[in-house]
Amino acid sequence: MTTEANSSLHFIRQIVADDLKSNKHNGRVVTRFPPEPNGYLHIGHAKAICLDFGMALENNGECHLRMDDTNPVKEDVEYIDSITADVRWLGFDWGKHFYFASDCFGQMYDACEELIRKGKAYVCALSQDDWKDYRGAPPAPGKESPWRNRPVEESLDLFHRMRAGEFADGTLCVRARIDMASPNLHLRDPVIYRILHSDHPHTGDKWCVYPTYDFAHPLEDAYESITHSLCTLEFEVHRPLYDWVIDNLDHLPSRPRQYEFARLNLTYTVMSKRRLLELVQEGRVNGWDDPRMPTICGMRRRGYTPESIRNFAEVIGVTKYESLTDVALLEHCVRNDLNLRAPRRMAVLNPLKLVIDNFPEGQTDEFDAVNNPEDAAAGTRKVKFSRELFIERDDFMENPPKKFFRLAPGQEVRLKYACLVKCTHVVKNDAGEIVEVHCTYDPASRGGNSPDGRKVKGTIHWVSAPHAIKAQVRLYDRLFTVEDPMAQAAAEGKDYRDYLNPHSLEIVTGLCEPALADAQPGDRVQFERIGYFSIDPDAQPGKLAINRTTTLKDSWSKMTEKA
Ligand code: ATP
Ligand code: MG
């Protein structure tokens, strides 16, 4: 698999291209992204968004953003706002095409009435439990509801009275009259309207009857003149019902078609809104935008760029096969993008003091540091240097193994951008821990050159102790310890929460070079040799909070190199 966004001709692109060629929809491409506003969007939705908006963009079409708000019970305005913000942040624009399914409740009600009038729907009084027996299980045919053949006038009257609020939830419903012997359960007289005495975030108390998803969705698509209604594979078995609804109503403005593709599943996370809501409500993460969450707002806060997510969506492609995508591929896309745009800075996350004994006390030097080797236009900056520095504790070993090229007693190392230093001795505390490493520097190596061409293999990063600024650094790891928490929980008779990674968040105090003082929330940097980081919105003047976006270790590249 290549990670170049190569605009592969996946099957949806092929279908759209063929339809344009045959002028099936008069040369129009109209798609929609139809989230139910009952949670925050996740990376799976991002795949759908990139596909829906992408097909429209590529073909001079339009893509509608539609709140599929037919279920009043679980929906909330908070979610609507987050959804629009996330789609915008991903870089897509729906123009004037922002819709609510609930704006069409009147038309849907009329459509249901039309079906009843045509004898294609009826009001049924079977309870949900009884219905299970009636519906039966293929290959055996189901049993007809005793209300299936009730006179049209009676059904119409009951439907009107359902709407007027005369009946309690669950007592009556409207069923499409299709085929009780169908091998497809969805065609065995499915419910199309139900009673729900519940206020709706958008229509208030106007309605106490609501259409089901299966009835509403094809109608929404038709009312908006959608040409290609793209959804995930679980809706494939619903498609005959989708087509039935469209085919049995007169005067619909258009004839939409539904196409299904495989949903995105990612390793080391869960992706259903219900599970994500549980994690938030139970306080297992710090909200929907916790950087460990697979939500779009979580990834934004973590420092992922919209470009990297769009590239990821292109690279994974669109197929008809269920699969589990390695999160390392997503991280690889993030790294590739940040490599080009993130300025380099130095920071030490696990500090050890380094004292340069032959550098004059109280004196400061300054070195030029390259801001981004991938981007000449990013220029250089000055980095302050002094007698006392901090280096990464890992970069020193008192008794190093053979191939340890960093700092050790008697060993010489390059301090990036600055000079060569050689370790003379260490100072320990009473507990025997090293608290200071002492060195001498070679004045002829200013700028980090090797003056006489002598070999110095290791280069380490550093910050100047008197100049460094403190930051709270949040080191994120995978949220779960196993690749597929849902599947593993099912296989082992456990709960998916049993696999939460107790070390998914570690907070340390880092020391950063002074250039970080100007960083704004949302800014992204590469801390040299450590990883990509982004400034958290929690940051306040003088109080930096920084999220680790990814480490530098690219396990995806490693895997693909081996393969
Ligand atoms: P979830 O299953 O996570 O609760 P959902 O399917 O209920 O999500 P919707 O709001 O109904 O969420 O989804 C909006 C659109 O996003 C639908 O067209 C759906 O098919 C698509 N979608 C949802 N999850 C994924 C996914 N993991 N991969 C690709 N597309 C997805
Ligand atoms: Mg859904």
Image (cartoon, rainbow, N blue to C red):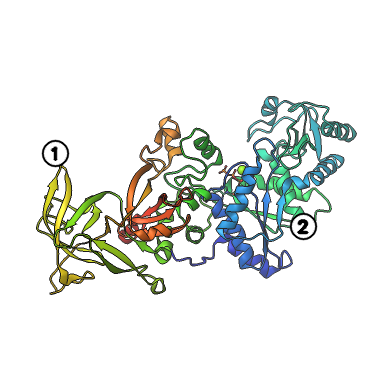
Image coordinates for residue 104, horizontal then vertical, percent: 78, 47
Image coordinates for residue 145, horizontal then vertical, percent: 76, 29
Please rate how many residues cluster around mark 1, counting C-alpha atoms within 10 Å: few if below 14, some from 14 to 19, many from 20. Answer: few
Residue 398 in sight here: yes
- Left or right of residue 116, residue 262 in this image: left
User: Where does the C terminus fall, quadrant-wise?
Assistant: bottom left
Q: Secondary structure at mark 1?
A: loop
User: Where does the N terminus fall, quadrant-wise?
Assistant: bottom left
Image quadrant assignment for residue 216? top right
Image coordinates for residue 110, horizontal then vertical, percent: 84, 44
Front one among 452 and 299? 452
Image coordinates for residue 77, horizontal then vertical, percent: 66, 43
- Vertical comparison of 215 with 365: above or below: above
Q: CA distance from mark 1 to mark 2?
A: 82 Å
Comparing marks 1 and 2, which lies closer to the viewer?
1
Image quadrant assignment for residue 138? top right
| Residue linked to disc 2 | 254
- Left or right of residue 400, residue 157 in this image: right
**Amino acid type, callout 1:** Asp
Can you tell which mark lies on residue 430? 1
The residue located at (54%, 65%) in the rendering is 9
Front one among 510 and 313? 510
Front one among 302 and 391? 391
Report if the CB atoms under discs 1 and 2 are less than 8 Å apart: no
Q: Residue furthest right?
A: 153
